[in-house]
Image: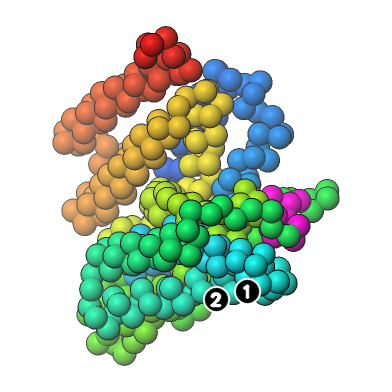
Amino acid sequence: MSEQTAELAKGLSRREKLDRYLSLLGPMVMIAALLIFMALLEPARYFRVSNFDIILKDAALYMPMAMAMTLVITTRGIDLSIGSVAALTAIIMGYMVKSYGFPWWAGVSIAISLGALCGLINGLIITRLRVPDLIGTVAMDLVYRGLALVLAKGVVLSRFPEEIVAIGRGAIPGFLPIPVVIGLSTLVLGFFIYTRTRLGRYAIAIGSNPEAAELTGVPVNRYKVYVYVLMGAMAGLAGVMLAGKLNAIQATSAPFFNLHVIAAVVVGGTSLFGGRGSIVGSLAGVLLLAMMLNALVTLRIEFFWQSVASGVVIISSVAFYTWMQQKDRDGQGGFMEALASPENRRLGKFLLILAMIIGSLFLLGYMFAGDTTAVR
């Protein structure tokens, strides 16, 4: 009996180890497919050192927010206000530095602190007023965007100090770009928080079963507020990085930050149903989306197709991980046994047809990109 128990425990530990890396399977397969696709169509333009530098800088902008969003979604939460928070904090920083003579480091500190304050407000609305995360953050997105519009009054703030510009697009000679260093540093911090601190453990417990976590003594509301404060602070940091990257900021900046970050985190294997997340997977998701959008630009496909591609990636990744979780709940065998079932064979055929349709749409977009004769 003890030998059977030991074998069961050994098998379980192996499965747990496999599940830990399963979240990387989806984005890594997509990255490999994208690289092969671009190697066939545009190898000279895509596989350049300068282009990969652009990809890294684009991805770095979303790394801090992806780190914090991983924790938020792990607790079964969501934050749809981060784009407005980034714009609002960057505008306030711009006024502080340009109009009131604050030093650049004070402006950056104020932006991050204000972002944390916005996150605190979001967390209190969700926990104290018991407003659902989705409704609460959407409403606050309108509030923060409205405040940004009131403060900016249609003005584009530009020409920031060199130090702020360096945060967004500078480089350490012989090393990585400064925004990449900042983004990776936040991910390392997030990995430590997620795996080594009480906040990370409680986030998983809250997302898995909030009622059970509360019964075991976990202060659920307090730690939910903590993750939203962290989310707001990282949105403020992203606003600073965006202002530095563009050397300008306006009230309508960062309109799609929320969907882009959520897409990257979900693609990386963090469950929208809570209780499961991966900081490393979020990094892979951020890189995948940056590479995909860069590929669309390289192929000269219109900007609007980027939204189509992001939506497809979100739907595909959520469907994949939902299916994997259903397989675990149903007690089906291994991965190959699940794929061999009649239901999943039909699902595979449907996905293949869907992929062919979407691929045809992208091919049409590529063929007619830049062709203005059709609208004359």
Counting every numbered tag in the picture gives: 2
Q: Identify the residue position indicated by label 2 in the image.
A: 113
Spot occupied by residue 343 in the image (x, y as percentages of width and height): 16, 36
Closest to the observer: 122 or 148?
148
Query: What secondary structure is the magenta-colored segment mainly?
Result: helix
Closest to the observer: 273 or 298?
298
Query: At 34% across and 37% down in the image, what residue appears?
Result: 312
Query: At 33% across and 80% down in the image, what residue appears?
Result: 124
Q: Which residues are magenta?
A: 162-171
Name which residue type carries label 2.
Answer: Ser
As drawn, the label of residue 109 is: 1
Q: Secondary structure at mark 1?
A: helix
Name which residue type carries label 1.
Answer: Ser
Spot occupied by residue 289 in the image (x, y as percentages of width and height): 48, 42
> In the rendered view, would you say 255 is above or below 152?
above
Q: Is residue 310 visible?
A: yes
Quadrant in which the C terminus is drawn: top left
The answer to the question of whether label 2 and label 1 lie on touching residues, with beta carbons closer than 8 A, is yes
Question: Distance from label 2 to label 1 (Cα)?
Answer: 6 Å
Query: At 64% across and 40% down in the image, what residue appears?
Result: 54
